[in-house]
Image (tube, rainbow, N blue to C red):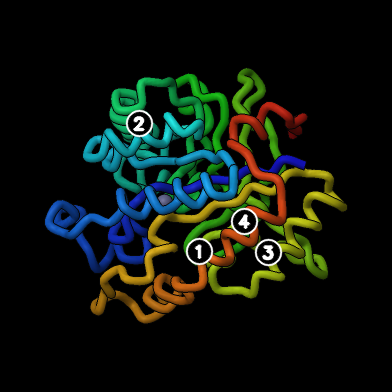
Amino acid sequence: MLNALSVDVEDAFQVGAFETTIAREDWDRLVPRVEANTDKVLALFAGAGVKGTFFTLGWVAHRYPALIRRIVDQGHEIASHGWDHARVFTMTAAQFRDDLVRARTAIEDAAGVAVTGYRAPSFSIDARTPWAHGVLAEAGYAYSSSIAPVAHDHYGWPDAPRFAWRPLADADLIELPVTTAKFRGRTLAAGGGGFFRMLPYGFSRWAIRQVNGEEARPAIFYFHPWEIDPDQPRVPGAPLRSRIRHFSRLAAMEGKLRRLLGEFAWGRVDAVVAGQAPLRP
Ligand SMILES: [Zn+2]
């Protein structure tokens, strides 16, 4: 079973958890670490012999075009994570369209290849954005991996399908939600990020085995380059809960990832999408 491996390429100061502490206008004054951290991810993937998908901010592609070319040259898929991490439910349909164009132009200019995949910042396509998949289809995207079908304080659409589905009757666009697992009737987030980093490795292994086995579906896993950077600067003014979530167990992350990459079969998201028989609810 080929599972989807994905990286959301953004700097630590761009995450939703710090948006009330660090203003967008200040991003250019902060010391960037995204390029060096993404190079560490590339080395990790090369060492494990795996390919993945890098959902990249247009903001990052615009500043580090050589990084984008290294990603593509090494056989990975380059895809869009929006321009500057504005969440979809904070935008109008027209603003979302503009954000997609701006990001894709920057990424394609750097990459020299077409972008056909999209992941919403903080899984921000949900019941509040019924127009979002229509805008993506109109823009020519083949797939979106933008929904977390769970209840969570920052994101989530608990009623959405857990596996690949076609959200539109008149378009082939596929939505590939991030992985969840079932435990005693509850749906648990199990697709990576902070859950993978903070919970014991065995939880993620159990969840992926459940999805691959009982459900006979691929896992859709994600993490961020800043999660393998234990030396990143702390953010003293940020809310305590955000700081705990962001900075916990960073030093253990790289070793856990290496274990995960060795234990399951991983590939690019577009390759996994191609092998799916999506539901059309
Ligand atoms: Zn993100």
Pick the front one: 147 or 49: 49
Within 10 Å of disc 3 (Cα), the crowding (few <14, some 14-19, many 20+) is many
Mark 2 touches mark 1? (CB < 8 Å): no
Q: Earlier in the sequence, mark 2 or mark 1?
A: 2
Residue labelled with disc 4: 191
Asked where in the image residue 31 lies, by quadrant, the reply is bottom left
Nearer the viewer's eye, disc 2 or disc 4? 2
Mark 4 touches mark 3? (CB < 8 Å): no
Q: Secondary structure at mark 1?
A: helix
Residue labelled with disc 2: 69
Residue labelled with disc 1: 254
C-alpha separation, residue under disc 2 versus residue under disc 4: 27 Å
Nearer the viewer's eye, disc 1 or disc 4? 1
Label 2 CB sits under 8 Å from any ligand 1 atom: no
- Which residue shows up at 51% across the image and 72% down it? 252
- Which residue shows up at 12% across the image and 57% down it? 29
Going by the numbered disc 1, the residue's amino acid type is Glu
Q: Secondary structure at mark 4?
A: loop
Q: Secondary structure at mark 2?
A: helix
Q: Position of residue 202 (x, y in %)?
A: 71, 70
Q: Position of residue 131 (x, y in %)?
A: 49, 33
Q: Which mark is residue 204?
A: 3
User: Does residue 269 appear in this view?
Assistant: yes
Q: Earlier in the sequence, mark 1 or mark 3?
A: 3
Label 3 CB sits under 8 Å from any ligand 1 atom: no
- Which residue shows up at 83% across the image and 49% down it? 215
Residue closest to the far right: 214
Within 10 Å of disc 4 (Cα), the crowding (few <14, some 14-19, many 20+) is many
C-alpha separation, residue under disc 1 versus residue under disc 4: 16 Å
On the rendered image, what quadrant is the N terminus found in? top right
Going by the numbered disc 3, the residue's amino acid type is Ser
C-alpha separation, residue under disc 3 versus residue under disc 2: 31 Å
